[in-house]
Image (cartoon, grey):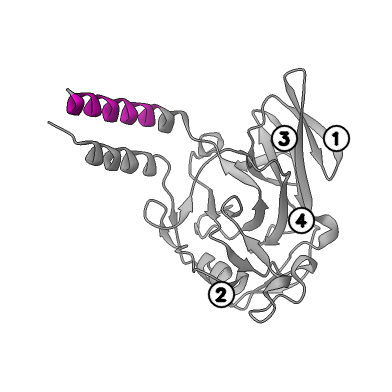
Amino acid sequence: MKITPISLAIALSALTAGANAALIQDGNEANLDEIINGSLIVSGTAVNALGDTTTNDAITSGYFRNSPDGLDSSATFLIEITSLDTSQTFGIFNNNDYIQLFSGSDSGSFETSGGYTGPVVDAGTRARVGFEVNNGNYKVYVNDTLEGTFSSNEFGFYLGYGGAPVIYSDATRNSDGLERFVGFQGQNQYLNLGSELTDGCTSNNLNSCVVWGWDDYIIGFEDGSDMDFNDLMVYIEDIVPVPEPGTLALLGLGLAGLGAARRRQKA
């Protein structure tokens, strides 16, 4: 079968998109559409948040690194809709090393359009994460305090219960093998994070809002069986996804095919 460069690119896109798929359900509580589009976005393009992650705006990348803009990444706690909110912990991991960023006691008040009032973080407990290379290892700083060392500058996110990670952004590390993490990339929308960070943010006062840029993500975890991915939501700034090895291999195959096609055309 002859595959043209365009059809090859489409085929590769379909394969990589389906590598780690999840189905984001509506659920019985405020769903991701209501939370993101109805509460967080004050101005800008709406997000397609429900349904299959191969067709909506969500990604299921397991690992990230700091944005190439050179800024430290930061995490702002958004909301928990779960009976485990007082015991949950959130952080980053690299292989078997992990560093906690938030705990269930970080709370405030933020009402979603679905009528749920849940915990959010205030400006004093916002976590800023930076890396410093030292003899091949990466020192991890949280709010300018050295918290640990990773073997690389790549990290995933985890959800725990009072300590060690239990649910990972990397589905292969989850005990059931299910995808329990989704992320949504910004498109320069204006957000009200429901905390001191965006106090006064309205559609008439966008200067008090946060700009949800291309290297900023709203991430959500699923800790049960309803698969609505609103059990823990965090706003992460200045990160980029790390391509999966399979994606890189397919991309290499695609580039090789495109190169061969171009050589044939020149011949």
In the image, residue 169 sits, relative to residue 233, either above or below, namely above
Q: Check disc 3 and give the amino acid type.
A: Tyr
Q: Residue 146 carries which label?
A: 1
Q: Is residue 61 left or right of residue 101?
A: left
Kindly check if marks 1 and 4 are in contact, taking CB atoms under 8 A apart as contact: no
Compare residues 22 and 205 and report the one nearer the observer: 205
The residue that disc 2 covers is 38
The residue that disc 3 covers is 98
Residue 194: quarter of image: bottom right
Kindly check if marks 2 and 4 are in contact, taking CB atoms under 8 A apart as contact: no
Locate the N terminus by quadrant. Answer: top left
> Does label 3 or label 1 sit earlier along the sequence?
3
Q: Check disc 1 and give the amino acid type.
A: Leu
> Does label 1 or label 4 sit earlier along the sequence?
4
Q: Give the range drawn in magenta.
A: 249-266
Locate the C terminus by quadrant. Answer: top left
